[in-house]
Image (cartoon, rainbow, N blue to C red):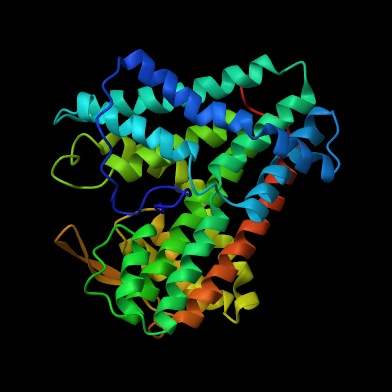
Amino acid sequence: MTATAAGRPSGGARAAIPTVGRPRSAAMAAIAAGAIGDAVCRSAAATAAAGAIGLVVRPRSAAAAAIAAGALADAVLGDPRRGHPVAGFGRVAAALERRAHRDSVRAGAVYAALLAGVVTAAAAAAERALRARPRALAALRAACLWTALGGRSLGREAHAVAALVDRGEIPAARRRVRSLVGRDPEALDGAGLCRAVIESLAENTVDAVVAPLAYAALAGAPGALGHRAVNTLDAMVGHRSPRHARFGTAAARADDVLNWPPARLGAGLAVVLAPAVGGSPAGAARAWAHDAGAHPSPNAGVAEAAFAGALGVRLGGTLSYGGRVEHRPVLGDGRDPGPADVARAARLARLVAAAATLAAVAVAAGRPTLAVIR
């Protein structure tokens, strides 16, 4: 995930957070306040957006309108620069990790289940409280989806790095790219920086756009926020650092499972939409089929390979995380990417997001929800 409000950087890079000396029950309350309370505060804006697209009170159409309103809010307004509930959740999760950490898979599973469970349960309780008020329920779902999405922030950061590379400001681009990736950027040249940005666009279009839309369509606010919680925990503790090699296993596996279907959906959309960015569906499909399986991530490899083939560029290769060198497979058989290719990748990401939004709206219109609101 990105280090913007879209999520945390790929590879688990994260800022140091002061220790929070408070009881665990208070920490749990803070999680609910960060993930749900802020979303409720956004409900007025979400209601206005939903009204603009004709929100009605019938359950199916209201669920569909909530998704459209949440997606519209992200596309138009993006994320707040400060006070994002995902960042608040991350601070609480980091504080709890310092207390709960053990070199144990079981301890990590309890940690991840507790945090993700509290967020999901709080969202379900909020939906249950509003079950007799369809408009308010739809506004809540729209606000929660808005909280979970990060497409606009992702694109903004990608364009910013590409502009710096285009102007030859490589040191500044290396500093800026840290908002998107967790790898060490100091040795990256212009092509390496563009490669990192395109890989982040591909992976995070799944994590921060396609997956939240899919789970919002299937399970309302609990689905959108529950996925965001798991994805954030994976970015924080799911990497293979010495501290989290065992403790982060459960978060990493849960994220793999949750993102498996959205990754294939996102890659499929990239294949279909390749001509819109001057690419070839056949090339995208070929890169996906030939190269994705060698990637260490079962989901990031699929998205990155499809984007590489669609754009006609070469991604992957050797990189470094925290001084640890990784030799990743090459994805695609095209040229090294440049700033213009970042712009094409950002456009492809927007098109995939738009298509995924339409699909989510259609699913929500066909089935009211799988969320527990009875």
Q: Residue at x 31, y 63 (%)?
A: 294
- Above or below, comparing residue 58 to residue 186 in the picture: above
Q: How far across and how far down the image is residue 60, in percent?
A: 79, 32
Q: How far across and how far down the image is residue 172, in percent?
A: 34, 72
Q: How far across and how far down the image is residue 108, in percent?
A: 25, 29
Observer-nearest of 260 and 206: 206
Observer-nearest of 142 and 85: 85
Residue 19, picture quadrant: top left
Q: How many marks?
A: 0
Observer-nearest of 42 and 296: 42
User: Quick check: can you spot residue 287?
Assistant: no
User: Quick check: can you spot residue 162?
Assistant: yes
- Above or below, comparing residue 270 to residue 13 in the picture: below
Q: Residue at x 77, y 15 (%)?
A: 132
User: On the picture, is 253 further left or further right than 347?
Assistant: left
Q: Residue at x 39, y 52 (%)?
A: 3
Residue 97, picture quadrant: top left
Q: How far across and how far down the image is residue 276, in percent?
A: 65, 75
User: On the picture, is 55 further left or further right than 156?
Assistant: right
Q: Is the C terminus in the top left, top right, bottom left or bottom right quadrant?
A: top right
Residue 287, picture quadrant: bottom left
- Above or below, comparing residue 163 to residue 348 in the picture: below
User: On the picture, is 27 further left or further right than 186?
Assistant: right
Observer-nearest of 52 and 289: 52
Q: Residue at x 67, y 51 (%)?
A: 357
